[in-house]
């Protein structure tokens, strides 16, 4: 079965970089995703990476993938108060369904 | 381009009742997936519909059922509601062709409370 694990909480000072980590177990994962969820809202797709890549950069977001260790990270540069939210890592296997972690709550302090 | 929409936004039901939740997929998308998100947890896959057929199911009992219509909108039906069914129900649509275009985009969710 699939298992995705994330640390539950991260506190970061405004302007600093945030790094959210995720590990997964399914070696057949094809794509890995990062979604953001604000209170009372649905999931907003932030970025994704194909499993044969090791890095993807998109403006303030950098995704690193270590396929050997099944480790995924999301770095947010220059973290702002609007970045406070829950961040979910998800992996997609050959069956197209997404398996999510429990989410990392990011709190940005002034 | 219209995003994924869901209705209703909130719903309160009592144990044993039945509920129908609705989802309209994003323009150009033919695949709809449903997820259940309990409080404090990540979303759990319920099932997926592709071109009106169920295309995979998670670990949910048969009282969770669905439909997809020719316009690719979808319904999630839950019979014999239990207290543990209280959750945010998320619908996601995608192009269903595999690869990067199969990325799932989520609606705002329906918050179901079972009393």
Image (cartoon, rainbow, N blue to C red):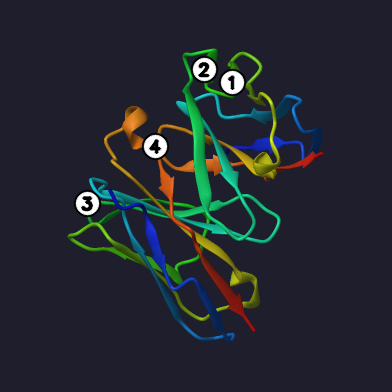
Q: Residues within 10 Å of mark 2 (few under 14, many from 20)?
A: some
Viewer-nearest residue: A65 or B84:
A65
Of the residues under marks 3 and 4, which one precedes in the sequence?
3
Q: How far apart are the two marked residues, 1 and 3, measured between alpha carbons?
A: 35 Å
Determine contact: label 1, label 2, CB under 8 Å.
Answer: yes
Query: Which of the two marks, 2 or 3, is nearer to us in this view?
Result: 2
**Residue pointed to by mark 2:** A56
Is any part of residue A29 visible from this angle?
Answer: no
Label number found at residue B103? 4
Q: Name the image quarter holding residue B75.
A: bottom left
Label number found at residue B26? none
Query: For the point 62% across and 29% down, which residue is it?
Result: A25
The image shows residue A93, relative to residue B104, as above or below, that is above
Residue A89 x/y as whole percent: 60, 36
Q: Name the image quarter holding residue A80.
A: top right
User: Horizontal placement of B104 versus A14: left or right?
Assistant: left
Under tag 3, what secondary structure?
loop
Query: Which of the two marks, 3 or 4, is nearer to us in this view?
Result: 4
Q: Name the image quarter holding residue B14.
A: bottom right
Q: Residues within 10 Å of mark 4 (few under 14, many from 20)?
A: many
**Residue pointed to by mark 3:** B51
Under tag 4, what secondary structure?
loop
Residue B85 x/y as whole percent: 59, 71
Query: Which of the two marks, 4 or 1, is nearer to us in this view?
Result: 1
Of the residues under marks 1 and 2, which one precedes in the sequence?
2
Label number found at residue A62? 1
């Amino acid at each position: 079965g699939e298992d995705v694990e994330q640390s539950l909480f991260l506190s970061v000072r405004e302007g600093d970089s945030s790094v959210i980590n995720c590990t997964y177990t399914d070696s057949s994962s094809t794509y890995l995703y990062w979604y953001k969820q604000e209170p009372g809202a649905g999931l907003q797709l932030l970025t994704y990476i194909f499993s044969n890549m090791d890095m993807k950069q998109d403006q303030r977001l950098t995704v690193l993938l270590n396929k050997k260790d099944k480790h995924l990270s999301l770095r947010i540069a220059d973290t702002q108060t609007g970045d406070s939210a829950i961040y979910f890592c998800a992996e997609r296997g050959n069956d197209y369904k997404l398996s999510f972690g429990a989410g990392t709550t990011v709190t940005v302090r002034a | 381009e219209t995003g994924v929409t869901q209705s209703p936004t909130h719903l309160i039901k009592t144990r044993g009742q039945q509920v129908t939740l609705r989802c309209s997929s994003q323009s150009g998308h033919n695949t709809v997936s449903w997820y259940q998100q309990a409080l404090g947890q990540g979303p759990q896959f319920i099932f997926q519909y592709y071109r009106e057929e169920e295309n995979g199911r998670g670990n949910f009992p048969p009282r969770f059922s669905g439909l997809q219509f020719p316009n690719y909108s979808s319904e999630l039906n839950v019979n014999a509601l239990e207290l543990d069914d209280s959750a945010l129900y998320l619908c996601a649509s995608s192009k269903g062709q595999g690869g990067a275009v199969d990325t799932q985009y989520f609606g705002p969710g329906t918050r179901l409370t079972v009393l």
